[in-house]
Amino acid sequence: MTIARRSLTGERVGRLPASGIRRFFDLAAGTEGVISLGVGEPDFVTPDAFRNAAVRSIQEGKTQYTSNYGLLALREAIAEHTKQLRGVTYDPKGEILVTVGVSEAVDLALRATLNEGDEVILADPSYVAYLPAIVLAGGVPVPVPTTEASEFRLLPDDVRKAITPRTRAILLGFPNNPTGAVLRPEDVAGIAALAREHDLLVYSDEIYDRLVYGAPHRSILDEPGMQERTVYLAGFSKAYAMTGWRVGYACAPAEIIEQMMKIHQYTVMCVPTAAQYAALEAIRNGEADVRRMVAEYDARRKRMFERFNAMGLHCFEPRGAFYCFPNVSSTGLSDDVFCERLLLEEKVVVVPGNAFGDRGIGHIRACYAASMEKIDDACDRIERFVGRQRR
């Protein structure tokens, strides 16, 4: 009798698709002369002072585990930073957890608070990891369509329509990856009112909160009564040019942080010690570096936005993060085909919008965290490519 062999992998993970971004990096690997606008990563080197702080910690022999919660000095600095920035107070000893980037913070928050079958509302399009993270935590993603006409904002009326008796939480990722959208004050107030009315949690991923242009960032924490029902997620990767250091953090009520810490404790123990010392220097003394880099991103943002519209690829003006999200449907090509052919014919990497949700279809994501010279060169190549499609 032949016994059927069991699958070597679990069903939940097996149902997840691979990242729609990774395929284009694999295609570009090893190709000479490629300009990548695909990676959501600052092109700036981590500032000297931050790197030197990490080196100094190693030289001083600070190479042991830290607390599972993270260095107390770092948590205290995060508490002070958050108080100054958001006007709320967190206890560094029980309401702050230092994580391996914000990606781990998102994962921990979901796993610590969701029960099987709980629904989580989020914007479509949004960051590629959100849907898989919700599924892996046993939740059910409920994408709410956003539109170019409303600048890809998550509108309270649309959120209200998506709420059911199974709704547990709303996941906010604004400023938004991939669109560059930001929420208006009335959007944030409306979403907060819904969370209070329906007793919902809010996971607020604000990794791009310092990368805003033309108006201050509005956080869900700015709304009354939201601190006790919000898991605030932030970190060092984007604004401080520290992607490879992998330092993020979560601020939340102690009962949530404790559960997040248990998962963190059993999986990664703690964030690498030297990276935490680099982050401590960054949050204490890095404000001038942040302002310098944000000013440069703003100039690049304007250049790329203008170039896309000038070549006939309609692009709404992004007000946050470091992405443009132009509509390429006027070329007659799908976003997948556009990206594949652009790479093959002009050696420029951008990401198809469908990687971020159904409402991304027909768009591409282009990252302006690249030098002005590279942006101009890439836009020249894209314009050449677009011109050939319209002959």
Image (tube, rainbow, N blue to C red):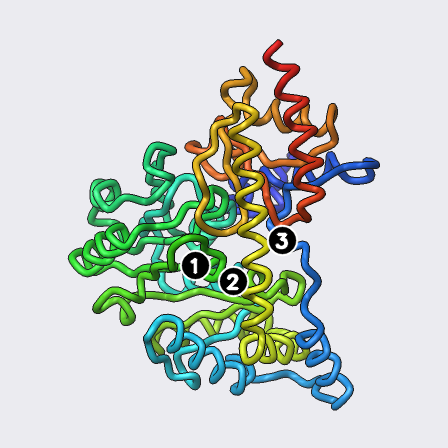
Q: Which residue occupies the foreground of this view, 380 or 22?
A: 380
Q: Residue 96 at what x, y percent from top left?
A: 44, 77
Q: Single out the residue that lies furthest toward the top.
A: 391
Which of the two labelled residues, at mark 2 and mark 3, occupies the earlier sequence position? 3
Q: Residue sitting at 43 percent across and 59 percent down?
A: 205
Which of the labelled discs sits on residue 38, or is there none?
none
Distance of mark 1 from mark 2, alpha carbons? 8 Å
Answer yes or no: is residue 343 visible. yes
- The residue tagged with tag 2: helix, strand or loop? helix
Q: Residue 326 at what x, y percent from top left?
A: 51, 32
The residue tagged 3 is: 41
Quadrant (top left, top right, bottom left, bottom right) of the C terminus: top right
Q: Residue sitting at 57 percent across and 25 percent down?
A: 311
Q: Which residue occupies the foreground of this view, 291 or 113?
A: 291
Which of the labelled discs sits on residue 102, or is there none?
2
* Three-letter amino acid code of the residue under disc 1: Asp
Is 206 left, or right, of 160 in this rendering? right
Distance of mark 2 from mark 3, alpha carbons? 14 Å
Tag 3 near tag 1, CB within 8 Å: no
Which of the two labelled residues, at mark 3 and mark 1, occupies the earlier sequence position? 3
* Three-letter amino acid code of the residue under disc 2: Val
Tag 1 near tag 2, CB within 8 Å: yes
* Three-letter amino acid code of the residue under disc 3: Glu
Q: Residue sitting at 36 percent across and 72 percent down?
A: 252
Is 73 left, or right, of 340 in this rendering? left
The residue tagged 1 is: 205
- For the residues carrying marks 2 and 3, which lies nearer the camera in this image? 3
